[in-house]
Image (spheres, rainbow, N blue to C red):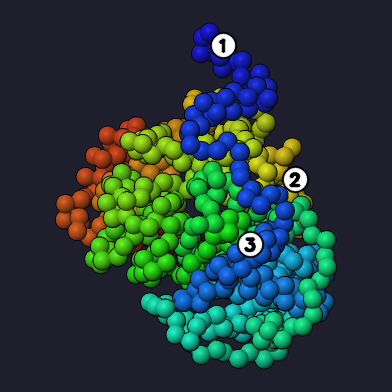
Amino acid sequence: MTENKATSDYMRDENSYLAHARALQSAAWPADVPRDPIFPLGRKPLAEYLGEWARRQPDKAAVMFYGRAISYAELDRLSDRFAAVLARLGARKGDRVAVFLPNCPQFYICFFGILKAGCVHVPVNPMFTRPELVYEINDTQARIVIAHDRLAQLVDEVRDECKIEHVLVTSFLDALPAEPEGPLPAGLTDVRIEVPRTIDLMSTIAQEAGAPPQVDVGINDIAALNYTGGTTGMPKGCVHTQSDMLFTGAVMSSISMSVTSSDTIINFWPIFWIAGEDVGIILPVLTGATCVLLARWDPVAFMTAVQRHRATVSNMVVDNVVEIINHRDAGRYDLSSLREVIVASFVKKLNPAFRTKWRELTGTTLREAAWGMTETHSYDTFTRGWQDNDRDLKQQQIFVGIPVPQTDFKILEFGSNKLVPLGEEGELCVRTPSLLRGYWNKPDATSEGLIDGWLRTGDIGMISEHGTIHFLGRRKEMLKVKGMSVFPSEIEATLGQHPAVTGSGVIGRADDTRGQVPVAFVTILPEHRADVTPETLTAFCRERLAVYKIPEVRIVDTLPMTATGKVKKEELTRLYS
């Protein structure tokens, strides 16, 4: 059979296309990875998982926070009481409750209390400004807000504008022991700020005598509104159910990683963020593991906590890894307990040099966390099983693995429903059990993005001839150089393979003859500033990229960053000389 005949066979229709891709992916499936997600206690609401673990292992810590341990039984009891508080304040099934908190154990109490009350969890970014807060509260029509004391004043300012009826306030001090285990981040032990017209969260929970409301909560009921980052227009609330949460937790614990109740997970990712919610809340409670929660990233606090608690599992960004392997005191800490460490490449990219240094330090092999979106509840592909001889890092950029079970990808031409053959770029489309049910209050966006059960992501992607998934970035970032498509993400990933490069951001510069020219702003390790030059990096790229993709290289001290660790491309033009 000729290649053209083979292509025409699987391109007959969508079913043939998907069957062909699935067969390739099945053949590439790693031998030690299950082919179906494992649900440790079956398919049931996440709050029932908490209750069952509370019965089976009541004294085991669900959350550890700087020396304060909250057991599964205590978390179950406190969230029961908070559900009763919500009912007494008038919350009913389907009502949205906003959680305006940083990383702290109270977040867990509120999360599970909201689910037990049949309400909808609305995590609000604690870095929000006034207009952003007003937008999200009004969009969700949340009438109850739980806020950190440092954020409660802002809530009070917008209270009438947003028609907020009740504000419950808590502080870090409410969750700390008398003698917290350090090192502590700045502000953790600050004296509480008193805000008028608010209710003290923890004392109210402690005094609550009522039973939790008896609400019929199913796994397919709306459970959360997780807002997108708003890179194109205003943020949109992704409607997710407990079924979405369960599926994500199951593929994380049995496909992306192998996590059980004997594990200790260390998490510093913000738990208001979908990935932080997945790692810090859903993964431990689904598996019955313990989560060591950090208020924020700090390399010494991380290494101390790993050694103290013998942590076995962590999700990081590559920047965190580099900070640790370059830390002068890294060798003083025992990090050998770490078994599963997966990373996200935002600015710094995972490369063989970083992997080797991390393995020398910890004995653990880093691997990418792969691809996901807020719309899909994240973790839709996996790279586990591709690390032998750095096979994952040697794949065509940007390799994000193969789909998790029950998840399909296809590539369409932008603006049409025409399928694109394997090996060619187009719009990345995904279908998965954890796909959002729609965008909250956005019927037009829902009808445009969700078509016949598929999410049209607006991202550029490719499925290779071997069935692997490759993410090439946002369409709006794609450059045209002499009429040919150039993806900034591919150049950034290539630069990230250089051992001296710590980060990069690529944008386009208008050019009369070429249309656009890629310009790469690059940061490098301080000890290499004398020997690594733009010419050095250009030569490095020339060995790995087609000639029309070679960027102009500009070495800079820092890159403008978003709060979630991504490069602000719109600000890079200000770095032009």
Q: What amino acid is found at the position of numbered circle 3 in the picture?
A: Arg
Secondary structure of residue under mark 3: helix
Residue toward you, 340 or 59? 59
Residue toward you, 394 or 49? 49
The structure residue drawn at horizontal position 63% and vertical position 24%, both measured from the top left corner, is 19
Residue toward you, 37 or 17? 37
Query: Which residue in the protein does label 2 denote?
Result: 447
* Quadrant of the frame with the C terminus: bottom left
Task: Report, in whole angstroms, how far the alpha carbon at label 1 lies from the one at label 3.
Answer: 58 Å
Q: Position of residue 565 (x, y in %)?
A: 45, 60
Of the two numbered discs 2 and 3 in the rendering, the one whose residue sits closer to the viewer? 3
Of the two numbered discs 1 and 3 in the rendering, the one whose residue sits closer to the viewer? 3
Q: Is residue 403 above or below residue 529?
A: above
Secondary structure of residue under mark 1: helix
Q: Earlier in the sequence, mark 1 or mark 3?
A: 1
Q: Earlier in the sequence, mark 1 or mark 2?
A: 1
Task: Report, in whole angstroms, how far the alpha carbon at label 2 lies from the one at label 3.
Answer: 44 Å
Instruction: Classify residue 344 as left or right of residue 55.
Output: left
Q: What amino acid is found at the position of numbered circle 2 in the picture?
A: Ser
Q: Is residue 389 above or below residue 557?
A: above
Query: Which residue in the protein does label 3 denote?
Result: 56
Query: Which residue in the protein does label 1 denote?
Result: 5
Q: Position of residue 210 (x, y in %)?
A: 79, 80
Label 2 crowd (10 A; few <14 / some 14-19 / many >=20): few
- Quarter of the image for residue 237 reads bottom right
The structure residue drawn at horizontal position 19% and vertical position 58%, both measured from the top left corner, is 527
